[in-house]
Image (spheres, rainbow, N blue to C red):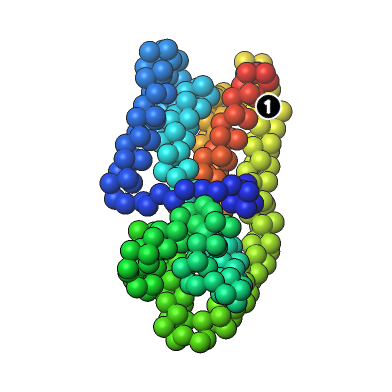
Amino acid sequence: MWEISRCIRLPFIEMSLQRKVLLVAIGALLSAIPFVYLVFFLRGELLESIRNVGGVYVVTSVKVNVLWTISLVLAMLPYAVVDYFIDLFIDRVHRELPEIFKGLAEALRSGLTIAESLRHVAETYGGEIGKILKNAVVLIELGLPLPQALEKSVSRFRLPALERAASIISTAYESSGRLIDVLESSSQIFGALRAYEDERLTALRPHMMTIYVSTILYVVLALTILYVFVIPLSKLQGIPGAMGKIDPGVYTAIMYFAGIIVAFFGGMLVGKMRYGKASAGLIHSAAQMSIVAFSFYMAEMFLR
């Protein structure tokens, strides 16, 4: 998952307000599917499984709880997936910028003009960055100055890294004779920054994996407590000298809800650690919540 951006060329989708609203609306429509199924096929089980625990109503049916979890995951999924691939695109831009600066410097040193160098690098790397450079070349050939062509080409992305790269190339171009030296220095600087970021991610990766492991361990411990202790003890009810009334469904629901909460915030923490924003962890939250829901459902089917 962490290295997918190295092997796939991704399109860029600008997250405008209208698109965010559209993604939320799609998520809402998807989340309605499990509720429709619940109303038509599991309504009786839902009503029978409602318990009053200390003034709080709890749904004890594992099937119903798994269904609303699926609904929540589907609600998050459209926004989470698009946001995740945008982050992968940004990561790919950061990885390719050093090579782009180096490629431009080598092309200029070989005697190509700036427009020819941009075209050469665009054809070499392709992807969205290649499209940006090709668009800049077209604008230059139409008579637009290089600084304006680059600025216009990167403007729709609104990415600081691309804006800095365009500014560096434009400033170096206007300084005439220092263009190749500036591009080579920029390649080294951006490469050093990328190396530092890779080292940081290498150090963080075990911690991010630990969050997934902690969710799995919680599920294992919760199911062990339920199916080794709570449920067997509940079967002793009515035997003289045994414990008082135990409702295993209530304990299962509490363990399940706690697991979903752990999974949700664990995924958000992964996103914060990896990309510096909690919203990037929605896809990890969805994955961990799915692990919890699947585990409890399979236990209900085969261990009860």
Where residue 81 appears, x then y in whole percent?
48, 43
Residue at position x 69%, y 56% in the image: 206
Tell me which corner region of the image, top left, top right, bottom left or bottom right, holds residue 106.
bottom right
Q: Element type at marker 1? A: helix
Q: Residue furthest left?
A: 18
Between 229 and 297, the one lying in front of the other is 297
Is residue 144 shown left or right of residue 241? left
Residue at position x 42%, y 77% in the image: 170
From this view, report whether residue 192 is shown above or below residue 255.
below
Between 103 and 237, the one lying in front of the other is 103
Where residue 171 appears, x then y in whole percent?
43, 81
Looking at the rendering, in which quadrant would you find the C terminus?
top right
Question: Can residue 108 be seen at all in this image of the molecule?
Answer: yes
**How many marks on residues?**
1
Between 70 and 11, the one lying in front of the other is 11
Is residue 283 shown left or right of residue 234? left
Question: Can residue 152 be seen at all in this image of the molecule?
Answer: no
Q: Residue furthest front?
A: 111
Residue at position x 46%, y 77% in the image: 168
Between 251 and 165, the one lying in front of the other is 165
Residue type at mark 1 is Tyr
Residue at position x 66%, y 57% in the image: 205
Where residue 242 appears, x then y in whole percent?
67, 23
Label 1 sits on residue: 227
